[in-house]
Amino acid sequence: MRQRVAFATVAILMLAGCAGPAVRPKAAPAAVPAASASAASSPSVPGSGALTGDNIDLPQSSRYQHQSDSGPIQPPERIADLPEPTPVPLPRSRYGNRSPYTVLGHTYHVLKSAKGYDKRGIASWYGRKFNGYMTSSFEKYDMYKFTAAHKTLPLPTWARVTNLENGKSVIVRINDRGPFVANRLIDLSYAAAVRIGIWPKGTGLVEVQAIDPKHPGELLPPVAVQSPGVQPGIWLQVGAFADPVNADRMVRRLRNAGIGPIRVTRIHVHGQRVQRVRLGPLHSVSAADRLARKVKRLGLPQPQVAVD
């Protein structure tokens, strides 16, 4: 689970309606607008305990009823029977699409289009703490619907999320911003996390593929999953250098600090030969998080996660 950012005031939300999102230190929660609820989401599970009101004027420390996040007290067995949403064309959200926007000192640029988006990374999930509260698209989060949060994909975006460790996948509607935690690609609703086996583990290695609902015949094929018993590797990319001297300098700096294992590979980017300096492979999210913190303590930028 992650950290999140909240709307400051109604006025900010109105401004976001013209220019983009007011965001929280996590990816926010979400339910579907009345106009698209039947087409975009599966039905709620009775007894979810969703709030009927959300005072967005309150500070983060007192806005939420629960101080820490969790799943429901009694996880519903009905999650397995909930129907996944069918992607349908939806208008661009009035809220949540401002670009650029800044959260916790980091600036993000919303993609103009989700077309062709296909990326691997680490997924987290969010649940009971945010259930019933407003998302960045000014919808209410329902942890029993198949939704998700992403930092840069347009709202809404349909996507297929596949767990690379077991091959399970789920279709979600991305309608929120986040997760604003280092090395996390997407934040899944509780229902989506259960469907692909990330709950209650907390995190998982996934592939996120955008879906164009106007061209259902062009859906990307399911991703290739690792062989049974083979864990996907996590890499931390510290830098990519056109000048091999700079790559060597980075390698020496990491080695002098006792940071490794280090792998240098040569790739071509836009016709230019580049030396990529990575740490890994690492076999757990926690190991990647610890190593990333060591890199940051050297005064280097936050390393980028890659999953191969």
Image (spheres, rainbow, N blue to C red):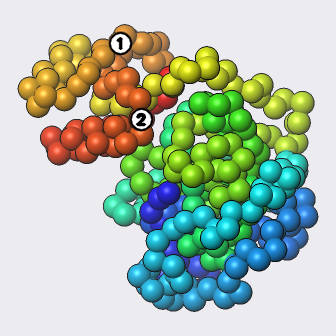
Question: Whole-percent x and y of residue 280?
Answer: 34, 24
- The amino acid beneath tag 1 is Thr
Query: Taking 289 as reference, is 199 left or right?
Result: right
User: Extreme left residue here?
Assistant: 256
Q: Nearer the viewer, residue 195 or 104?
A: 195
Task: From the image, tell me which residue sits under label 2.
Answer: 284
Q: Nearer the viewer, residue 117 or 173?
A: 173
User: Few, some or many C-alpha atoms within 10 Å of disc 1 (few <14, some 14-19, many ≥20)?
Assistant: few
The nearer-to-camera label among 2 and 1 is: 2
Q: Position of residue 140 (x, y in %)?
A: 69, 74
Q: Could you tell whether 221 is left or right of 178 in the image?
A: right
Task: Work out whether mark 2 precedes mark 1 in sequence or the reverse, and give the earlier one.
Answer: 1
Q: Residue at x 37, y 63 (%)?
A: 104
Please tell me whether mark 2 sits on a helix, a strand or a loop. Answer: loop
Q: Quadrant of residue 164?
A: top right
Judged left or right of residue 172, residue 37 is right
